[in-house]
Amino acid sequence: MGRVAAAAVALGALCAVMATGIAGAGTSTTATTISTAKDAKFGTILVAGDTPVYILKSGKACDATCQTDRPPVLLPQGVTTPTAGKGVDAAKLGTTAADGGSLQVTYTGRPLFWSAKDTGSGKPRGIGSDKFGKWAVVVPKGAPSSNSGGNGGSNPGSGGVSF
């Protein structure tokens, strides 16, 4: 009986963390506006609030296990369209169906995710590979990049994807 009670308490704590935000990220699990921010390594990247967003470049789909560390960027309940903030082409934003009837924000048709490694400081820490594939920040095509030699190109450097 004690194990059941402990499991119920642990499950309740996990639900509370997911309802209020990403553990350690200082970010809610929902966003309405996708904007751009400058990063020293990648140049201009997509963010929700001040937290970088990522795409899964290759590999498997990001299932419930994956979403523990890579929560999907979801629209708040009742919102059906993401808003393009500064530097974002509204025509490239969209949604896809997510678990529980939620809508996940997409960019050029690719689902967006957060990383539990990010602290909300705007510095991407969630780049890399895991058993689901390769994760990259999104560099809007045509946005200035720090690796472009100052020519206004769209070279995202290592760990960024331009589109």
Image: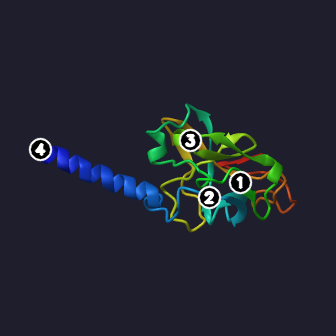
| Nearer to me, 108 or 158 | 108
- For badge 1, the amino acid type reads Pro
- Residue on which the image places disc 4: 1
For the residue carrying disc 1, how many other residues have a C-alpha within 10 Å: few (<14), some (14-19), or many (20+)? Answer: many
- Residue on which the image places disc 1: 82
Q: Are marks 2 and 1 in contact (CB under 8 Å)?
A: yes
- In the rendered image, the residue lying farthest to the front is 78
Quarter of the picture holding the C terminus: top right
Mark 2 vs mark 1, CA separation in Å: 8 Å
- In the rendered image, the residue lying farthest to the top is 60
Mark 3 vs mark 1, CA separation in Å: 16 Å
- Residue on which the image places disc 2: 31
Q: Are marks 4 and 1 in contact (CB under 8 Å)?
A: no
Q: Is residue 120 visible?
A: yes
Residue 117 image point, x, y percent: 48, 56
- For badge 3, the amino acid type reads Gly
Label located before the other in sequence (3 or 4): 4
Label located before the other in sequence (2 or 4): 4
- For badge 4, the amino acid type reads Met
Label located before the other in sequence (2 or 3): 2
Q: From what the image shows, is residue 62 above or below residue 18?
A: above
Label located before the other in sequence (2 or 1): 2
- For badge 2, the amino acid type reads Ala
Q: Are marks 2 and 3 in contact (CB under 8 Å)?
A: no
For the residue carrying disc 4, how many other residues have a C-alpha within 10 Å: few (<14), some (14-19), or many (20+)? Answer: few
